[in-house]
């Protein structure tokens, strides 16, 4: 008989999060034995893990229970600045609510090496937590004035301004520096010395202003007085690849609640979630006069032959002669969005994911799928009617430039490196950043119908955000929108009836039980070739365990992503907030029954 190991006192056992790229379904913490009883939560230690030695951070003492399992000893404590308790709590909470592992968030909170002269001070919080405030602006002047006023109001405190992109961070940094402020800019790639100075200021609990993207949420804040979320509806706040997957707006609100910070959301067109809670609080957004917007019906001319209306061609020619700036935006990349038969109107689609195949150039010999990477050689005849009249339908940026050159208009493909003083006609995609050329220009959205018809319940909301951002950015020009459905609710909202659009969308989501009236959890289960029906077996095993908790499964489907076939299914909870105990039970079931390569999205844009 083997003797059981001696029971160690509970105070010498600690829970440690390893600082490694752990899979999502791995245990959040591991128990280690500490020789020193003075290791506080937040202390960085060196731990033996599997066959190597890595770093980790202590989250607290282990539960007060005895175990006969062998517990390894902590190798040594590292001379790093310990994480504040608030930061540690925020990381563990963010990992729990997004179904990620805490180790995925630690790189933004750690410094290697961290030999800096700073000690975390006791946090200073407000006595009362105030609800977030939403400001709905319609001109960049209103946005800049509000940011300057808020910076001035929180000059003697800790103020975090969250921005969607790094380009917007540099733009805002230039604006505040021009008015005499000295904000700190948080970038993903910084030198060690710059990161040391940043951590020293953050941990020193001194007043400072910081501008950053998603990663700035995980800085070791000892205190936080104000949080400003700029352009809260922007799609770049979603972190998808690489993991962890989360929405920065949701985590920013959680961070502000933890620190009882004053929260402000700035937006040209609020998300439906923000508008729903704003409408419940009965506050009034700051609205101004909208810019000039003109809707052009594509059914009045042959859009397959001429992508632009004759009137728009005349405007572009006159603007080019006057050395003005004209931006022509398309919703697709490449040469043409699809290849179509001229006899039977058959369109080539991907055999894996049913997405439309596109041609990358006019002389391309094959078609490519932008979704899963599938390629197919262009056949000489139509596979349906054997017709020989195969033609490119639609206009991408390359074909649009070719069309404009035939009409003696000097058009170029837009690049972000273009000088702000450049003039002429530029062609690009609708998701590019045109902030350097957008002032005083004419913007022409050539074809937005696929943007309105995306197979997602957020299609109309996403289209309104894109078009509203363009309309607010035009200072003295005009926004022209070409569409085959000029009476679409999104275009009506663009013309001034945005409140009616939001009320109708919220009523539809409440009727069909979509967010913000429910919670969706989208799960992508990869299907390997040798696994057979293993994915369906896991799916059938998971449902009987999750359904009693209150979750209802939505229809499942197979989708190809990056040449990988996956079984996609969505779980719906009928309330916007899942109770913590219920979510912990659901997360435990998912970890027990799903493999490590499963992709889980707790705030999906589609099902």
Image: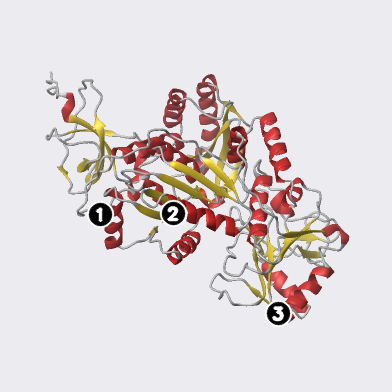
* Residue at which label 3 appears: 410
Position of 575 with respect to 52 (left or right) is: right
Q: Which of 518 and 390 is in front in this view?
A: 518
Quarter where residue 338 is shown = bottom right
Q: Residues within 10 Å of mark 3 (few under 14, many from 20)?
A: some
Q: Do the residues labelled 2 and 1 touch (CB within 8 Å)?
A: no
Residue 220 seen in the figure: yes
* Residue at which label 2 appears: 152
Label whose residue precedes the other's in the sequence (1 or 3): 1
Q: Nearer the viewer, residue 69 or 374?
A: 69
Q: Which residue is drawn at 56% across and 43% down?
A: 134
* Residue at which label 1 appears: 112
Q: Is mark 1 on a helix, strand or loop?
A: loop
Label whose residue precedes the other's in the sequence (3 or 2): 2
Q: In which quarter of the image is the C terminus?
A: top right
Where is residue 4? Give x, y as percent: 14, 21
Q: Which residue is drawn at 17% across and 38% down?
A: 74
Q: Is mark 3 on a helix, strand or loop?
A: loop
**255, above or below 288, in the image:** above
Where is residue 274? Give x, y as percent: 58, 40
The number of discs equals 3
Quarter where residue 431 is shown = bottom right
Q: Which of 153 and 280 is in front in this view?
A: 153
Position of 15 with respect to 101 (left or right) is: left
Q: In which quarter of the image is the N terminus?
A: top left
Q: Are marks 1 and 3 in contact (CB under 8 Å)?
A: no
Q: Residues within 10 Å of mark 1 (few under 14, many from 20)?
A: few
Q: How far apart are marks 1 and 3 (CA)?
A: 52 Å
**373, above or below 62, in the image:** below
Where is residue 440? Give x, y as percent: 66, 69
């Amino acid at each position: 008989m083997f003797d059981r190991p001696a029971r160690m006192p509970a105070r010498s056992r600690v829970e440690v999060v390893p600082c490694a790229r752990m899979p999502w379904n791995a245990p959040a913490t591991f128990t280690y034995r500490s020789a020193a009883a003075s290791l506080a939560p937040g202390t960085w230690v060196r731990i033996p893990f599997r066959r190597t030695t890595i770093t980790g951070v202590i989250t607290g003492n282990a539960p007060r229970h005895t175990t006969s399992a062998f517990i390894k000893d902590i190798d040594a404590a590292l001379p790093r600045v310990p994480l504040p308790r608030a930061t540690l709590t925020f990381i563990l909470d963010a990992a729990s609510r997004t179904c990620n592992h805490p180790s995925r968030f630690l790189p933004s909170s750690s410094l290697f090496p961290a030999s800096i002269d700073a000690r975390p001070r006791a946090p200073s919080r407000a006595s009362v937590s105030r609800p977030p405030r939403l400001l709905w602006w319609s001109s960049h002047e209103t946005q800049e004035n509000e940011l300057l006023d808020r910076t001035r109001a929180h000059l003697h405190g800790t103020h975090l301004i969250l921005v969607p992109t790094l380009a917007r961070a540099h733009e805002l940094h230039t604006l505040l520096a021009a008015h005499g402020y000295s904000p700190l800019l948080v970038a993903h790639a910084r030198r060690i010395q710059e990161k040391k100075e940043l951590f020293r200021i953050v941990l020193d609990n001194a007043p400072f202003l910081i501008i950053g993207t998603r990663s700035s949420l995980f800085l070791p804040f000892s205190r936080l007085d104000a949080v400003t979320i700029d352009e809260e509806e922007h799609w770049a706040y979603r972190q998808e690849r690489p993991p962890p997957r989360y929405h920065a707006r949701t985590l920013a609100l959680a961070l502000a609640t933890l620190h009882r910070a004053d929260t402000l959301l700035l937006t040209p067109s609020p998300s439906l979630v923000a508008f729903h809670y704003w409408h419940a609080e009965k506050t009034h957004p700051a609205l101004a006069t909208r810019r000039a917007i003109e809707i052009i019906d594509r059914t009045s001319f042959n859009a397959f032959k001429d992508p632009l209306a004759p009137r728009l061609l005349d405007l572009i020619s006159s603007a080019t002669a006057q050395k003005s700036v004209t931006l022509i935006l398309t919703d697709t990349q490449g040469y043409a969005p699809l290849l179509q038969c001229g006899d039977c109107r058959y369109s080539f689609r991907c055999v894996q994911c049913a997405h439309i195949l596109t041609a990358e150039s006019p002389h391309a010999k094959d078609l490519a799928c932008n979704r899963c990477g599938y390629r197919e050689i262009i056949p000489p005849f139509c596979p349906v009617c054997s017709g020989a009249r195969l033609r490119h339908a639609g206009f991408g940026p390359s074909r649009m430039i070719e069309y404009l050159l035939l009409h003696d208009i000097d058009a170029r493909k837009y690049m972000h490196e273009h000088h702000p003083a450049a003039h002429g006609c530029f062609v690009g995609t609708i998701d590019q950043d045109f902030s350097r050329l957008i002032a005083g220009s004419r913007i022409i959205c050539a074809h937005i119908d696929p943007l309105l018809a995306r197979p997602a319940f957020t299609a109309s909301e996403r289209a309104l955000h894109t078009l509203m951002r363009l309309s607010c950015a035009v200072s003295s020009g005009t926004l022209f929108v070409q569409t085959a459905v000029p009476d679409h609710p999104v275009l009506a909202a663009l013309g001034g009836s945005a409140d009616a659009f939001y009320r109708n969308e919220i009523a539809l989501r409440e009727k069909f039980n979509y967010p913000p009236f429910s919670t969706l959890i989208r799960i992508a289960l990869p299907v390997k070739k040798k696994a057979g029906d293993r994915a369906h077996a896991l799916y059938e095993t998971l449902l009987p365990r999750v359904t009693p908790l209150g979750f209802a499964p939505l229809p499942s489907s197979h989708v190809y992503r990056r040449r990988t076939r996956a079984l996609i299914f969505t779980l719906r909870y009928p309330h916007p907030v899942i109770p913590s105990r219920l979510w912990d039970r659901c997360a435990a079931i998912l970890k027990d029954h799903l493999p490590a390569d499963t992709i889980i999205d707790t705030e999906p844009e589609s099902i």
